[in-house]
Image (cartoon, rainbow, N blue to C red):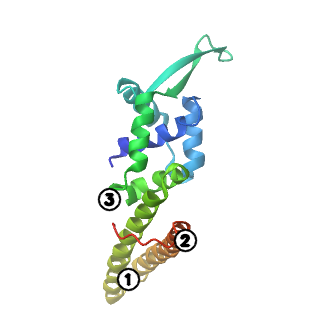
């Protein structure tokens, strides 16, 4: 999923709950996705404009004037088209769902995602990280052969980070399977 599609998906998910002003959208995205997904207004407002052009969102001017300004605040709201697009995205469990740039956005909407789709996404993410573990282990062995202590330490840190995420995913997958009655899925 390209960055602009991920941002669109995230905004649709946030606006599903209630209409919001641009600065509120930015704040909620930061709160839900964490400080490492900082979003600039230079990315947000062009995305909002694209979404309006596509008919995914609409806007309403508040009657309250912004203090010290003659402009009204604009509240963005989800349209029926936007709601349909969000539902389609929530039901999708394709490969882009578990990649680095998309997984956290998908995970932040797991409360609105059906259990089977959640499980497919978690399993896909785990498979992707298992591949990454193999790659990182091989890279660490190559670096150790060159005796570059700092690069080796950086590789080791990356390896440990991925191992922790795999452990976390294993726990979540087990919980999802238990909730589904022990159903096994291997669609990743």
Dot 2 or dot 1: first in sequence order is 1
User: Which residue is drawn at the image coordinates 54% and 73% (left, top)?
Assistant: 171
User: Which residue is drawn at the image coordinates 39% and 69% (left, top)?
Assistant: 185
Kindly report the distance in space between the C-alpha atoms of the residues bearing marks 3 and 1.
35 Å
Q: Pick out the residue farthest to the top.
A: 70
- The residue that mark 2 highlights is 178
Q: Is residue 42 visible?
A: no
Dot 2 or dot 3: first in sequence order is 3
User: Which residue is drawn at the image coordinates 53% and 68% (left, top)?
Assistant: 172
The numbered disc on residue 171 is none
Q: Is residue 147 visible?
A: yes
Q: Secondary structure at mark 3?
A: helix
Residue 112: give x, y in percent of width and height. Answer: 52, 48
Q: Secondary structure at mark 2?
A: helix
Kindly report the distance in space between the C-alpha atoms of the residues bearing marks 2 and 3.
24 Å
Would you say the residues marked 3 and 1 are in contact, meaning their CB atoms lie under 8 Å apart?
Answer: no
Q: Quadrant of residue 130?
A: bottom left
Q: Pick out the residue farthest to the right.
A: 67
Dot 3 or dot 1: first in sequence order is 3
Relative to 162, 28 lies left or right:
right
Q: Nearer the viewer, residue 22 or 87?
A: 87
- The residue that mark 1 highlights is 148
Relative to 122, 138 lies left or right:
left
């Amino acid at each position: 999923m390209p960055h602009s599609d991920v941002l669109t998906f995230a905004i649709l998910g946030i606006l599903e709950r209630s209409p919001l002003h641009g600065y509120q959208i930015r704040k909620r995205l930061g709160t839900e996705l964490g400080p490492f997904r900082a979003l600039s207004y230079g990315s947000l407002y062009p995305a909002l404009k694209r979404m309006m052009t596509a008919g995914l969102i609409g806007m309403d001017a508040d009657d309250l004037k912004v203090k010290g300004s003659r402009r009204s605040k604009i509240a963005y709201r989800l349209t029926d088209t936007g709601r349909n697009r969000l539902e389609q995205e929530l039901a999708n469990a394709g490969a882009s769902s578990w990649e680095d740039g998309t997984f956290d956005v998908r995970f932040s909407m797991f409360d609105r995602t059906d259990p089977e789709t959640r499980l497919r996404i978690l399993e896909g993410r785990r498979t992707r990280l298992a591949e990454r573990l193999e790659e990182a282990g091989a890279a660490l062995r190559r670096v150790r052969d060159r005796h570059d202590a700092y690069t080796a330490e950086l590789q080791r840190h990356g390896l440990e980070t991925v191992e922790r995420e795999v452990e976390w995913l294993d726990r979540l997958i087990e919980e999802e399977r238990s909730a589904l009655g022990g159903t096994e899925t291997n669609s990743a």
